Image: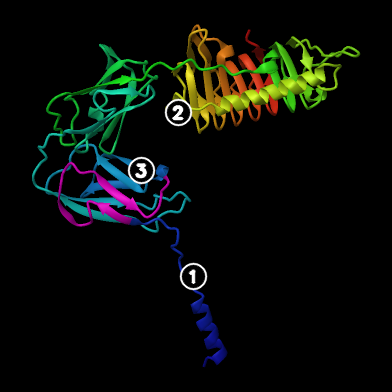
Amino acid sequence: MFSIRAMLLIVFIAGCEKITDTEGTPTITSTNPANNSTQVAINRMVVVEFNEPMDISTLTGLTFTLNQGSTSVPGAVTYIGTSATFTPTAVLSPSKIYSGTITTGAKNEAGVAMLSNYTFSFTTGAAPDNILPTVNSSLPLNNATAVGRDKAISITFSEAMNPSSLTASFTLKQGTTSVPGTVSYTGSTATFTPTNVLSASTVYTATISTGAKDLAGNALAANIEWNFTTGAAVANLATVNLGTAANFAILAKTKISTTGTTHITGNIGISPAAATFITGFALTLPAGGAFSTSALVTGNIYAPGYASPTPANMITAISNMETAYTDAAGRTLPDFTELYTGNIGGKTLVPGLYKWSTTVLVPTSVTISGSATDVWIFQISKDLTVSNAVNVTLGGEALAKNIFWQVAGIATVGTTSHFEGNILCKTGITFKTGASMNGRALAQTAVVLDANAVTKPQ
């Protein structure tokens, strides 16, 4: 017989049995079509709503599937907000039972998976879809004026469309000249994104042709066209006054270092850090000299501790550099905001004030094109990253001295890449091996070089 103590111990152990904690676990709150619904249109998309934001990379054709019996239905999965959408490649068969499944491969943003697969079913209607799609709205509106030159053009349909039918049927022209760009499709909205910013004060014509079809294969009844006019050319943008900082190809506050065979054409300077924080240049300072020299520099090297007037001049140059940074960062009313979401690779950049709240990436070569008096100011709230073997080049009569890259984060120019313009950096500037620059590297911390060529513009 069990003692009272043994019985209590058994009760205690049983009471300590692990209970699965489902808090924070993603679940399905609803589906559209709803489970067991009937007479579902055969051109319907299938939507699943989660109770929390999910990791978009886990919602694919492997984790969100649609089957008719044992046959898998081909389609594409998209995810916005807390909704995952399965868009069949073709219309569904009439009067058939379909089952949708979300597997445990679907995870929330914290990486937590669903506890089990979720399956629901619905039955399609008997009648095929023979209703022609129509256009509900467009942006910009027909005959709109002063349209931003960096704006995408979009059109919203009355029903879900076949995405593959939109690529060739959605076009943009300036007169008879086609504008290069890409077409994307989400929900029931198609968007045409021009490859480059549009010309100023110019009439453009957007067209959706009858090649655009819904999921049942029904085409638009007729081509849809609308016109809009872009805004005027950018007003003359005032240059950024560098003050005495303009006398330097490289100017920094904490460190300037180099490895490899670097060559600087122009002066370099440091303050308040001492000349000992300029490394790799093998400085030569004459007794009582106001500047030192280096075989790697066609110009002079200045630092605190050198003979007068260098210490005072360096204080002024650093102050002018900081003032120029504040000026560039403080310019308002940008001509282009969040252009290409920060990826400017392959683009041609016209004069103006650009503003990004993100890191700016240059994965492929970029052209800065304009006249000899035009000015470019790029306000970058995070980092500037130029990939390896990429060129930032000048087009037209554009001059490097009139280009200002204001970077709040870190500026990095990749291996063997070439860069144009003045970098005004709140933190550090790094040139990877073999990179070159026609401009100035002005950093409020350090400039790091590795076998680079930097030339101060005239």
Q: Which comes sooner in the sequence, label 3 or label 1?
A: 1
Q: Is 50 part of what is drawn in magenta? A: yes
Report the magenta residues as a range: 29-55
Label 2 Cα neighbours within 10 Å, binned few <14 / some 14-19 / many ≥20: some
Point out the residue furthest to the right here: 287
Give the secondary structure at mark 1.
loop
Q: Tag 2: residue type?
A: Thr
Residue 18's disc is 1
| Residue that carries the numbered disc 2 in the rendered image | 337
Q: Judge from the rendering whether residue 145 lies leftward or rightward of residue 307; answer left or right.
A: left
Q: Tag 3: residue type?
A: Ile
Give the secondary structure at mark 2.
strand
Label 3 Cα neighbours within 10 Å, binned few <14 / some 14-19 / many ≥20: few
Q: Which comes sooner in the sequence, label 2 or label 3?
A: 3
- Which of the colour schemes (rainbow, by chain, secondary structure, one colour) is used? rainbow
Q: Position of residue 37 (x, y in %)?
A: 18, 55
| Residue that carries the numbered disc 3 in the rendered image | 80
Q: Which comes sooner in the sequence, label 2 or label 1?
A: 1
Q: Judge from the rendering whether residue 444 lies leftward or rightward of residue 87; answer left or right.
A: right
**In the image, residue 286 above or below residue 251:** above
> For the residues marked 2 and 3, what is the alpha-carbon distance in whole angstroms?
23 Å
- Quadrant including the C terminus: top right
